[in-house]
Image (spheres, rainbow, N blue to C red):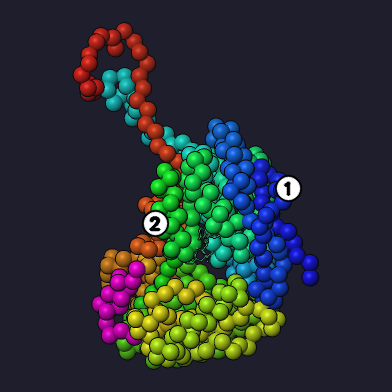
Amino acid sequence: MSTERITHLVGGAPWTGVSERTSKVYNPATGEVTGELDLASAATVDEAVKVAHDASRAWGRTSLTKRAQVLFAFRELLNANKEKIAALITAEHGKVLSDALGEVTRGQEVAEFACGIPHLLKGGFSENVSTNVDVYSIRQPLGAVAVISPFNFPAMVPLWFVPIAVACGNSVVIKPSEKDPSAVNAVAALWKEAGLPDGVVNVVHGDKEAVDRLLEHPDIKAVSFVGSTPIAKYVYETGTRNGKRVQALGGAKNHMVVLPDADLDLTADAAVNAGFGSAGERCMAISALIAVEPVADDLIGKIKERMAQLRTGDGTRGCDMGPLVTGEHRDKVVGYVEAGVEAGAELAVDGRDGPFDGADDGFWLGPTLFDKVTPDMSIYTDEIFGPVLSVVRVPSYDAALDLVNSNPYGNGTAIFTNDGGAARRYQTEVEVGMVGVNVPIPVPMAYYSFGGWKNSLFGDTHAHGAEGVHFFTRGKVVTSRWLDPSHGGLNLGFPTHD
Ligand code: NAD
């Protein structure tokens, strides 16, 4: 099978240079190498940043009306090309087609939000704060910004940031994951088709070398990063040390607390969907199910019934769950399953042996369920990022809350109950950024902001919504008067108002 060369997009065109380093891109459902990806050197990053920096000047001064028109056109093109982009995601990430389509839709919602940029950028105006003096606030673009994204949402995560950054008048250099780079290239081509001037959106592919150069380049003014916690922390510390504004979203361990009064059928559906959707490779996946006794036995029985119905296989064949993204990642997740068994957890469903509806060399692991997991086991402490759901049994609501709040991560959590008072108490007391009440994956809509607490986010600002607009602009306050003779005279005192 022939492999495709995948390269950077700089200034609206594919890069024509020769790359010193490349990496392989796989189809996880077959194990075949399908692409050879150019990895950017620091010099290639510099090229892209220069183009972005130059383009940002004119784009930042382009009228709000024209910027909004490009956003509307981009939204239409994204909608029209959804299936094509979803197919690229399935081919390189492995998630099933319906899930890939859902990812593009959630990204598109951010583009829809950004279409309202003229309203979102309205400032304040106070007339006559002092006699004949007015004060008003404006928000201006930053210049060139970087977006560095993870493998698990190759289209959606860049779309959390790029439409808002562009709508606010910035230019962007995107550094996608090297594991599934093609979706970003396809979306970047749509920006050009939508009428965005060349150079406003650029893509450089690469690894640590490219990321490090973006983090130190003086013309990159802000960095939006999404990835694992150690890299997020590194990106935040390095970027801020170099004077940049940084939001770095990290890893997660999301708990679903089930109270004894919950509807166990609906809860079991939700646990299976949230635990095994996208093979557990979601930062909002449920990986720890906290069963407040006496629900555990009944709930696990219902979860097992549902797991028996799931089909794992090639994402193009109408299966429920696809493969893991690489062979290396599959082996790492299998290592956690072995560690769980060794540590004494009860392996209630073993996903290691299939069956799998796909090629023998695919990166397979079926849905796996552990019972009687204790908080010291690595299957509980670590972010596994695979289809492994761990049930921890606790005696009370307070014990469940303690467990969730002691965890170093704080991305998402959910409580399942019919008791409104208990749910309300949980939303107040839990130390997590996104909370679901009978909703297992509480990803906020585009007009709210997405982000976790603690080790799940470094920086002050969450993604998209009003916080996104704030992140990609900086404020200025103007105090203005139109001079007339009454303003004359010398007075060296500190200005006060009359
Ligand atoms: P990752 O941290 O390995 O990679 C993320 C990005 O960082 C990629 O672009 C990668 O090329 C780059 N990178 C990798 N190693 C680097 C290094 N040493 N120095 C500089 N840059 C480096 O993450 P991943 O495996 O691609 O994605 C999965 C992780 O992302 C999980 O931990 C998941 O929870 C997290 N995630 C978080 C959110 C969120 O919103 N909090 C959303 C999606 C994914």
Residues 295 and 290: in front is: 290
> Would you place residue 394 above or below residue 435 in this image?
below
Q: Which residues are magenta?
A: 392-408
Give percent across and percent down for residue 158.
Answer: 55, 55
Q: Secondary structure at mark 1?
A: loop
Seen at 37% across and 66% down, the residue is 410
In the image: residue 199, left or right of residue 245 = right
**Dot 1 corresponds to which residue?**
16
Q: Is residue 493 visible?
A: yes
Quadrant of residue 65 in the image?
top right
**Dot 2 corresponds to which residue?**
458
Q: In this rendering, which labeled residue sits more in front, label 2 or label 1? A: 1
Local crowd at mark 2 within 10 Å, few (<14), some, or many (≥20)? many
Residues 387 and 427: in front is: 387
Seen at 30% across and 68% down, the residue is 430
Q: Tell me whether circle 2 and circle 1 mark residues in contact (CB < 8 Å).
A: no
Q: Secondary structure at mark 2?
A: strand
Give percent across and percent down for residue 476.
Answer: 39, 33
Residue 401 painted magenta: yes
Residue 287 painted magenta: no
Seen at 27% across and 79% down, the residue is 399
> Earlier along the polypeptide chain: callout 2 or callout 1?
1
> Would you place residue 251 above or below residue 370 in this image?
above
Amino acid beneath label 2: Phe
Seen at 55% across and 89% down, the residue is 308
